[in-house]
Image (spheres, grey):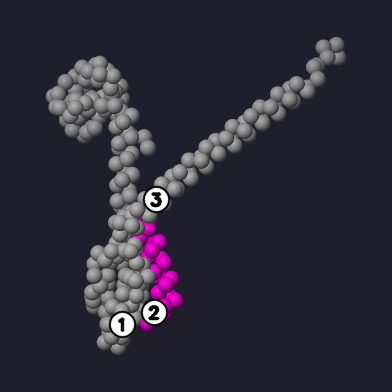
Amino acid sequence: MESKSRRNGEIKAPQVRVIGENGAALGVMPLAQALAMAEGLDLDLVEISPNQDPPVCKILDFGAYTYQESKRQHEARAKSREQELKEIRLRPNTDDGDLEVKAKHIIEFLERGSKVKVMLRFRGREITHTNLGFAQFEKLKERVGALAVIETAPKMEGRQLLAILAPSKKARELARIQAQKKSSQAKPEKEERGKKAESSDAESDSSLLANEAGAEPSNADD
């Protein structure tokens, strides 16, 4: 991902507040002086706080800076996915077959790094048998096994029994492995598409050369 931060000649402010490559504050100085300082260190001058007056710039390796920014954003997205909350709904009389299906859905969510809210609603006189709801949750937890940890223990809220399951360390490790597999699979596919494009271009060029070679020269006497 390309950084949108302005750098070197893209910076327009006549004066800038400069932070050195080691994090030291170097103070306010003319832009030309800051650019010369960065060039002397074979580094870049990057505008990191454009809305300040004067803008704050830092002397750094721009390639390393963009890599770290991309890494930070990736980690933030991964953390956001971990915090995503999915919902699974049950009934006190959900049979074992349906419970198995719902457990599989929960496992899929956990392996992606998502938390799961389990909601079990009681209707009518069912509310007098809340123990059935707690028993259903225990069955579900047994099927999910070591992939989940109970973040919020089951409790009654009105006519609903609510609980939240979070990915265990094992589930987070599986999510990380799956992400690595997707990344490693995407690279060969991209390279293969590139090879096919190059092959197609080469075939087009060969066909064009063959047509040119096979064309009869024009007769100037005709």
Q: Position of residue 72 (x, y in %)?
A: 29, 41
Is 145 placed left or right of 30 in the picture?
right
Q: CA distance from mark 2 to mark 3?
A: 33 Å
Question: Residue tagged by mark 1?
Answer: 132
The range drawn in magenta is 93-114
Q: Closer to the camera, 103 or 194?
A: 103
Q: Secondary structure at mark 3?
A: helix
Q: Closer to the camera, 30 or 133?
A: 133
Question: Residue tagged by mark 2?
Answer: 94
Question: Residue tagged by mark 3?
Answer: 177
Q: Amino acid at mark 1?
A: Leu
Whether residue 119 is visible to the viewer of this picture, yes or no, is yes
Q: Secondary structure at mark 1?
A: helix
Say if the magenta span includes residue 161: no
Q: CA distance from mark 1 to mark 2?
A: 10 Å
User: Residue 103 occupies which quadrant of the picture?
Assistant: bottom left
